[in-house]
Image (spheres, rainbow, N blue to C red):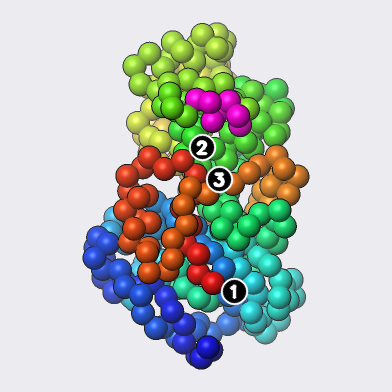
């Protein structure tokens, strides 16, 4: 392979799946303190197609052509000047979000700063490892900022989704009691993760109160549109946050966005290595099938992670 160019998925303007193309791009230069990762697999997240649509243009600068993708699992190919924590051949995972949208992970190579990196859990396949960072970190950071601890009662809105299923496992692993909302077809799945499932929709408040008459200590909203239900079941002194709904701010909650953090990612990887947290991969796609992966992600009914297998 010519190491000056690589195959990558790109788009040169905002739009729908029709703007996606597989093209030859320069292998990115490796800056001081960075590593170049040979991508084995890259996780798909809803934020990828939301950025592509232009829906987040008010939040982040895009430099075209954009290579989408923020989740990656791969092998360190080379290191920049004064990179001390990683060496060629290291197997790594990353939530590789940079300061602007340009050089993402749906490519044969991606540069990553150490603030985004952790060691790949050995027990995971490449596809599983690629599905962990963004969704897993989101759940980990929300729950810990809300004071997750053994003995707390936690309600997770959207417990069977990509972020929610990690949230359930993390909270259970740390000794919390977990109540989680999902459609009936996913209730057995939630039980297998250690949660007490409840159906969402009309009557949610009553169903949660039946399980937790004194209310819940922590509410993590991973779906949006549930502020009234949250406030109706929150115990006195309870805390809540959402990753999708700014209306929580008016109800005393936190509106959160995941951020790269190597210590959090390493702690998450340890939970995975111990067997407390598993990654479910729903389907894998080739690099030229990113449009298909985005189409499936948009439907919003996939249980588990969608992953692009690159090499």
Q: Which one is closest to the eye, mark 3 or mark 2?
A: 3
Q: Residues within 10 Å of mark 2 (few under 14, many from 20)?
A: many
| Residue drawn at the location 55% of the way across and 8% of the way down | 213
In the rendered view, does 191 fall on the left or right side of 98? right
| Residue drawn at the location 53% of the way across and 26% of the way down | 188
* Residue at which label 2 appears: 164
Asked if one can make out residue 221 in the rendered structure from this viewpoint, the answer is no
- Residue 69, position in %: x, y? 45, 63
What's the magenta region?
Answer: 187-193
| 65 inside magenta stretch | no
| Residue drawn at the location 38% of the way across and 56% of the way down | 293
Viewer-proximal residue among 134 and 147: 134
| 189 inside magenta stretch | yes
The mark found on residue 37 in the picture is 1
Above or below: residue 123 compared with residue 173: below
* Residue at which label 3 appears: 280
| Residue drawn at the location 47% of the way across and 26% of the way down | 181
Q: How many marks?
A: 3
Above or below: residue 12 compared with residue 156: below
- Residue 145, position in %: x, y? 60, 39
């Amino acid at each position: 392979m010519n190491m000056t160019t690589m195959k990558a998925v790109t788009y040169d303007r905002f739009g729908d799946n029709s703007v996606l193309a597989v093209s030859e791009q320069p292998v990115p230069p490796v800056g001081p303190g960075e590593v170049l990762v040979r991508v084995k697999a890259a996780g798909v997240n809803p934020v990828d197609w939301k950025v592509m649509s232009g829906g987040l243009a008010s939040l982040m600068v895009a430099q075209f052509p954009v290579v989408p993708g923020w989740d990656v699992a791969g092998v360190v190919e080379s290191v920049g000047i004064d990179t001390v924590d990683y060496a060629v051949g290291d197997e790594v995972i990353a939530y590789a979000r940079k300061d602007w949208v340009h050089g993402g992970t749906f490519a044969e190579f991606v540069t990553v700063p150490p603030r985004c990196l952790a060691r790949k859990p050995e027990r995971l396949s490449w596809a599983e490892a690629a599905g962990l960072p963004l969704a897993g970190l989101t759940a980990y950071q929300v729950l810990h900022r809300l004071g997750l601890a053994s003995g707390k009662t936690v309600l997770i809105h959207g417990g069977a989704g990509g972020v929610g299923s990690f949230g359930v496992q993390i909270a259970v692993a740390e000794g919390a009691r977990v109540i989680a909302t999902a459609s009936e077809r996913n209730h057995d799945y939630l039980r297998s993760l250690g949660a007490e499932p409840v159906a969402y929709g009309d009557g949610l408040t009553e169903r949660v109160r039946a399980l937790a008459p004194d209310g819940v200590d922590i509410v993590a909203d991973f779906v949006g549109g549930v502020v009234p239900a949250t406030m109706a079941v929150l115990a006195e002194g309870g805390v809540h946050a959402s990753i999708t709904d700014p209306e929580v701010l008016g109800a005393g909650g936190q509106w959160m966005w995941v951020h790269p953090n190597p210590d959090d990612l390493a702690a998450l990887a340890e939970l995975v290595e111990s067997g407390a947290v598993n990654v479910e991969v729903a389907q894998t796609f080739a690099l030229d099938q990113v449009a298909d992966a985005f189409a499936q992600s948009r439907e919003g009914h996939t249980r588990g992670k969608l992953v692009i297998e690159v090499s």
